[in-house]
Amino acid sequence: MRLVTNQLPKTIVYGTGSFQQVGIEARKVGTKALLISDQIMKSLGNVDRAGELLEESGVYWHEYLGVETEPKDIYVDEALTVLQQYSCDHIIALGGGSCIDTAKAVAVLATNGGKISDYMNNGKIAEKNPLPLIAIPTTGGTGSEATDVTVVTNTANAVKMMIKQEAFIPQKAIVDPVLTVSSPPHITAATGMDALTHALEAYISKKAHPFTDMLALSALERIYRHIETAYHDGENLQARHELIYGSMLAGMAFSNASVCLVHGMSRPIGALFDVPHGVSNAMLLPVILKYTKESCRDRLAEIARVLMPERRGDSVLELSDALVENIVSLCARLDIPTLRQWGIDEELYASQLEKMAGDALESGSPQNNPKVPGKAEIIRLYEE
Ligand code: NAD
């Protein structure tokens, strides 16, 4: 067995109603919080509720609500300014991956300095502990509450930076399925497919190992079985629980085993065309699974035996083909749009393929794929 290092948050408070613990958990790490969230969380009443809970526990708080989807470096800079202005001693991220990733970057910059782009490709390593961060996800989802990754767009060169260092793991996560009930169907579908892709890529990754396999298989089973119920019946708390629990496990899996080609190719689409991350992943998944499957049929068959136990006796060839077909049809049943349906201009898309393929390769994720493509092959896959 090769040497592996597994990293997870220090504390995870999980369960229905766990959001109520935010004040108690915050008081353990500081007295003045910066709450990083967005306008949708504000309109849903979640920001004010968090504020009340903090005050009940004797924690002062300030807010930064400027985060928008696919977060940009400017939100990080703005939030850091608020943090410094009020001398906040810890951070609470409340929202989807966009709010959590912004908060992770602020927590690291607050103690280690520099700009977030400095940390790209380990150009700068965060050597000091970040400010304590409590991540509270509201999508099920990125699993960012349990990963060592932040994804922030560099507005200077339109690159969606995937930055991976130990310092980006939140100190605490509070994971409450109730917070995801308000997520509308299209966001439930996109974020759920993002989580499924994390688990699948972690399982077929060249860096997978037994600990991440266990997490990825459990995540795949939960998400695959319950995503359609959550999509059609958002109030179904059992389905919401399975999705957010599955997304957290998937986050732990890929944080320690890495993602592969789908994620590598998905980020440039998000950065250049503002396609939400879960949607661009799901758009690419069918094409890339078909491209990759010859190189990992055994691993795909192992997943298929868990997701389709009634077909356990089938051959590896049949099982791996069936899994790919089922995932493709799942994307269709969840109404995941194609690039064309999303309204991307075809000429503009074609003109960006060279840059997209270069950015995908530079992220390092394609190199974890069971079959590693060169630049020309990535361009061909984008065209497909
Ligand atoms: P998001 O955070 O961008 O949220 C999408 C939209 O849904 C936003 O408008 C948000 O306000 C809204 N929303 C969130 N929760 C809601 C709820 N409960 N009810 C109603 N509306 C709600 O989406 P996301 O998919 O969670 O995060 C995407 C970002 O995370 C991307 O930038 C992606 O690259 C990144 N990401 C990070 C990691 C990581 O490990 N750090 C992993 C995967 C993806």
Image (cartoon, rainbow, N blue to C red):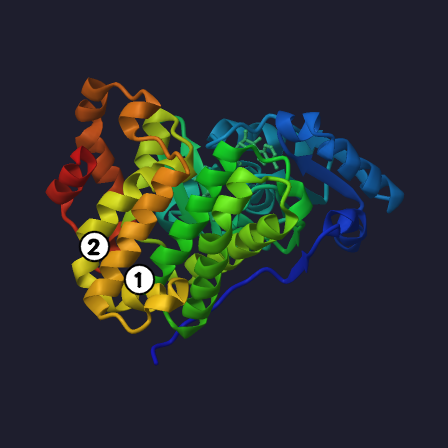
Residue placed furthest toward the left: 376
Q: Residue 345 at x, y = what percent?
A: 25, 18
Q: Quadrant of the N terminus?
A: bottom left
Q: Secondary structure at mark 2?
A: helix
Q: Amino acid at mark 2?
A: Thr
- Left/right of residue 260 with respect to residue 125 in the rendered view: left
Of the numbered discs 1 and 2, the one sitting upstream in the chain is 1
Q: Residues within 10 Å of mark 1 (few under 14, many from 20)?
A: many
Determine which residue is flagged by label 2. 292
Q: Quadrant of residue 336?
A: top left
Q: Are marks 1 and 2 in contact (CB under 8 Å)?
A: yes
Q: Secondary structure at mark 1?
A: helix
The answer, for residue 141, to whether it is visible in the render is no
- Above or below 50: residue 206: below
- Left/right of residue 295 with respect to residue 197 in the rendered view: left
Q: Nearer the viewer, residue 177 or 77?
A: 177
User: Which numbered disc covers residue 204?
Assistant: 1
Q: CA distance from mark 1 to mark 2?
A: 10 Å
Q: Nearer the viewer, residue 106 or 16?
A: 16
